[in-house]
Every structure is written in structure tokens, then in C-alpha cells.
Image (cartoon, rainbow, N blue to C red):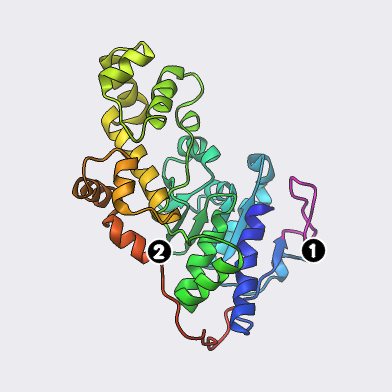
Amino acid sequence: MIALSNAVEPLRMANIITSEAVYDWAIVSLDGQPTPASNGLQLSPTVSLDRLGPVDILFVCGGVDVQEAVSPRIVAALRRLAERRVPLGALCTGGYALAKAGLLDKYRATIHWENLSALREEFPRIRLSDQLFTIDHDRFTCSGGVAPLDLMLHLVESKLGAQVSQLISEQFIVERVRNDRDRQYVPLRAQIGVSHESLIKVAQLMEENIERPLSLDEIASATGLSRRQIERLFKRHLNCVPKRYYLQLRLRRARELLLQTSMPIIDITTACGFQSPPHFSRCYRAQFGCPPSSERLARQPKLAGQVQPPVGQLP
């Protein structure tokens, strides 16, 4: 329900802000009957798929126990849509339905972090990402929770401009509009499983010491492991060296501070354990593709003038 609502509401608000019926939408099921969400609520009216007519994008929304919900009828229906070249999207675990139908093979795609590992195992031809959302040609996939809001704001911006997208985010008390370079946070336990307590203990120690990063020797002493053991754990389960993992933790924290606070960059540099602003800038650019100053400026658009109502209508 939260994924579906976060997909629909930005479209409604875009119509209000522009005073135009720019977007139209419908809730669809195979037979036209309302489908209850896991919270017991259901949305009406619902139309049947065969009565839907032309659409710009059809999104599949999934929730818990999605494997049981994806029936052969749903798979067949999705394949027929793909044959008609209907652009397809997925909200939260709805990506499983597209994957099961073979409609994400060789595409870049996103799904809720709880399903990432299972999907990688079952569907190795999909190029799965931990991004909040992914757009690859005519496939639009995103994680769950509020991630559909970010995807829809991105689509609104590409059609109606940054001003409308920003005004929608303000109406919904959203501090910043995230893009497809933002990653969903995947808990370490979800990445490696609960059986690797030693590695989880090391990672937690790193997270607790961001401002003054610990040396590998200090981490080894605190956890009762040897340097070599720690290095083997990171290589085997995360395919990286401990130093790189630690740096990514600090950069992720720095990005949160950069985009969600007004802290000066020099203070963020210190708070995240970097030696100097130039050192921080180099590391940040290597990780995110732009320096910290440019990132902050890009996320603070200056709105000026009135929003011009767009011409035309998108079904």
C-alpha cells in the first residue's frame, strides 16, 4: 500500500499544481476485482486488464509473499503486454513478476533490498542494482517504501520540469528529491546472512567510528580477529578490502550530511574522518561522480517565477 500510494500521489499533485489533467491513472487487476493489501485495505474502483486500453506505463505493485501471488495467468498477461511493446514498471517486489515472466532479462533493474539476493540467485540474467530506482529503456523498476515517490518525481521532472517536481516535494514535506544515483540502504545482514556474526561485528565497529576511523589493527584487537581473518571475510563475502568498505561507509554518511543538513563542507570533512577538504573532494568525486560542492548546489534548485501550465495531456 505504501509503494502504490507513493506512486499515485505525485501524479495527483502534479495535476493540482499545473491546474491541468496532465496525468491519468487506474488501478488494475486481472479480473477487475479489488485486491487487498497486507494491511487489509483495498482500493476501488479497479478495472480489469482487458478493459484498460492504451497506457504509457503499466506498473506491477507487489508486497509480501510475492512469489505465491505471481500466477501463470499474471505471467502470461505480462508477456502479452510486452509483445505489444507496452512499457512496464514495477513497484517494490512487483519486479519479481516481471522477472518471472522473463521481461527483465539483460535489463538493469531494482527491487526491495529484502529480495535482492534471492532474485540474483533465481534470475542471473537480470543486472540487479541496489539503486532506489532504475530506468532502462522501457523498464521502470524501483525499491519499496517511499522509493516510488522518487521515481515518479523523476518522471514528472523529465516531462514537466524541475519546478513542478520541486513543488510536489514541498507539498509532501520531502526534504530533497533523490535520483537514480541514490542507493537504497541494504543492511549487511541482508547481504551476507545472519551466520557471519564476525563480519557483522567488524562492520558495526566501523559504523560506530566514522569521525575517527580505526586502523585495521585496532579493529582486529577490538574484535579478537587477526588482520588476515578480517581481510578474508571482506574478500569472501563482500568482494572488497576492509579499507574500501570503511571508506564507502564514511562517504555515505558524508552524503547524508551534505544533502540533508546545512553543515559546512569543512565540518562534514572532519565529521566523516577525512584529512582535508581536497582529500574528501577527491574521494567523493571518485565515488559519486561529482565533487561535494556541485552535489549540494544541484540539490538546491532556485525556483523563480510562476509555473507555466504544460500543454497537452499524458494518459
Residue found 68% across the figure and 40% down from its top: 68
Main SS of the magenta part reads loop
The residue stretch that appears in magenta: 29-43
For the residue carrying disc 1, how many other residues have a C-alpha within 10 Å: few (<14), some (14-19), or many (20+)? few
Q: Above or below — where is 309 with respect to 89?
A: below
Residue found 77% across the figure and 53% down from its top: 35
Q: Which residue is mark 2?
A: 299
User: Residue 180 colored magenta?
Assistant: no
The reply to whether the C-beta atoms of the residues labelled 1 and 2 are less than 8 Å apart is no
Instruction: Name which residue type carries label 1.
Output: Ser
Name the foreground residue: 169 vs 65: 169
Quarter holding residue 17: bottom right
Mark 1 → mark 2, Cα distance in angstroms: 37 Å
For marks 1 and 2 on the same chain, the one whose residue lies earlier in the sequence: 1
Q: Position of residue 105 (x, y in %)?
A: 44, 50
Callout 1: SS: loop
Quarter holding residue 149: bottom right
Residue found 49% across the figure and 69% down from its top: 155
> What mark, if any, has residue 44 been given in the picture?
1
Q: Position of residue 289 (x, y in %)?
A: 27, 55
275 relative to 271 in the view: left or right: left
Residue 67 makes an appearance in the image? yes
Callout 2: SS: loop
Instruction: Name which residue type carries label 2.
Output: Arg
Quarter holding residue 67: top right
**Which part of the image, by quadrant, shows the C terminus?**
bottom right
Q: Position of residue 51 (x, y in %)?
A: 72, 70
18 relative to 126 in the view: left or right: right
Name the foreground residue: 251 vs 185: 251
Residue 241 makes an appearance in the image? no
Q: Position of residue 131 (x, y in %)?
A: 44, 50
